[in-house]
Amino acid sequence: MTKSEGLLKKLNDYCPGAVPMHMPGHKRNVKLAPYLEQLGAAVDITEINGFDDLHDADGVIAEGMERAARLWGAERSFFCVNGSTGGILASVLAVLDDGDELVCARNCHKAVYNALELRRAKPHFLFPERETFSGTDCIVTAQAVGEMLDKHPSAKAVIITSPTYEGVISDVAAIADAAHARGAVLIVDEAHGAHLGFGWGFPDGAVKAGADIVVQSLHKTLPSLTQTAIVHVCGERVDSDKLACSLAVFETSSPSYLLMSSIDSCVRLLEENSDKLFAAWKRNISLFKEETSDLKHLRIMEKTDKMFGFDPSKLVISTRGTNINGRELMRRLREKYAIELEMAASEHVIAMTGMGDTEDNLQVLATAICEIDRYLENSDAPEPPVLIPPERACFSWEAAAGERESVDIYAAAGRVSAEYVWAYPPGIPLLIPGEVIGEDFEQLIESREQAGISMKSTFSALPQKIYVLKKP
């Protein structure tokens, strides 16, 4: 294979002179409409001679994917233009056959649940240990994985999320050992961890830890366009050709060359300048921590003894014990300081940093946090309601085939849910179809709504109603 200078340079060299008698319909004529130039239409092409094909790559795209595999240390890597969602869907379908059993962390993204429904899979859920700072279930242990696999020896795979939305990292190496010793493969949703493993105070990631498939969103923390992701295959337990076929199912047959160029260019940037870029990123985070080290009321999450690892790029700021909640802190930062956070929960907010953050960005945030903290007061902090692990009446795909009806949430306890319930972000279901609605469900929904957190459901019945299966 001839070594190229990259997909973006190839596009820039080719596009100015060639006559495009092919898709897309704008024909790279950026004078046609002002938005076309802003969106990069001058280098927007389809699969034409010399530009390779994502789904049958043997040229410049194949070279880019090989470069990514070397960078992260994978056996094989795939560009993904449908985000980590597409990578997760493809990974599950490549590893499982219809009706297979698996072990799945219950705090996985809803994309995992969609994939399980497509495969009519039979998940055995692990309810992770609770992380007390943010109040989220996120810590998966190798012991729990091993015990669950021993209890269900037919399980073919284990699926976990690491790092979590809040940045908590599980001991992936130990989990991989536990899974492999029992004949199961390990899929890690590492959507929030594409930057891990490059040093400079950032922990190692799941590729180095021995996971079999690792799905990463480049756009979440690295300099790449939204919707760009990479799927890594590590070792020989997964048929990478089968995964390639699954990716072709969930990705368009006309993938954007702008998005693929973004992935390729991001990989090249890391290959050439990672030390300088990661050093600057880590320095800026450290300066933020120094500026906020004397907070009196707000608290910023750090690694605890209970965690195996923590991603310092996530700034999780707790409002617990103060006279405001997470939603109010987010509102103040937006309206007074023009700072838009990633998300707000009942008692914390998440400010995501990325490689593109400057020292000035984080200084503005630090100043705002310190100013807000100065005028806060202490307040009683009752324990937030915790969702009791629900009982499963049937699998989600069985519930999807049943007849449903809507009921008021105050009358839903004891009924079997016919829909997913989640807050977005982060998109982790609190309730899935086929689970029995608990006595605490109404209180759980009301507490989140009162905190300003809008709860979502499959059929948009919340917060007043929820769809349940009709009684036989």
Image (tube, rainbow, N blue to C red):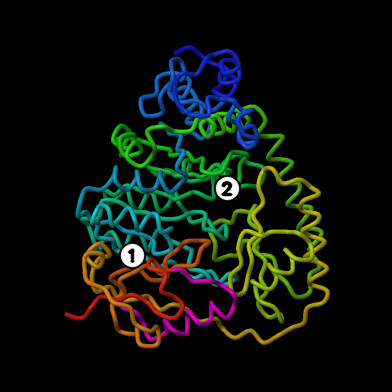
Question: Is residue 73 left or right of 348 when viewed as pictured?
Answer: left
Categorize mark 1 by other alpha carbons within 10 Å: few (<14), some (14-19), many (20+): some
Question: Is residue 159 left or right of 162 when viewed as pictured?
Answer: left
Q: Nearer the viewer, residue 378 or 23?
A: 23
In which quarter of the view is residue 142 placed? bottom left
Q: Residue at x 59, y 75 (%)?
A: 452
Front: mark 1 or 2: 2
Q: Residue at x 43, y 23 (%)?
A: 47
Residue at image mark 2: 220
State if disc 2 and disc 1 touch (CB < 8 Å): no
Q: x, y (%) of residue 349?
A: 64, 66
SS assignment at label 1:
strand
Q: x, y (%) of residue 65?
A: 46, 28
Q: Nearer the viewer, residue 191 or 470?
A: 470
Q: Amino acid at mark 2?
A: Lys
In which quarter of the view is residue 374 placed? bottom right
Q: x, y (%) of residue 436?
A: 30, 78
Q: Is residue 200 above or below residue 458?
A: above
Q: x, y (%) of residue 470?
A: 23, 78
Q: Residue at x 47, y 44 (%)?
A: 83
SS assignment at label 2:
helix
Residue at image mark 1: 125
Q: Is residue 454 magenta?
A: yes
Quadrant containing the N terminus is: top left
Q: Nearer the viewer, residue 201 or 16?
A: 16
Q: Is residue 29 above or below residue 208?
A: above
Give the magenta range. 436-456
Categorize mark 2 by other alpha carbons within 10 Å: few (<14), some (14-19), many (20+): many
Of label 1 and label 2, which has the lower sequence position? 1
Q: Amino acid at mark 1?
A: Phe
Quadrant containing the C terminus is: bottom left
Q: Which of the numbered marks, if any, corresponds to residue 146? A: none
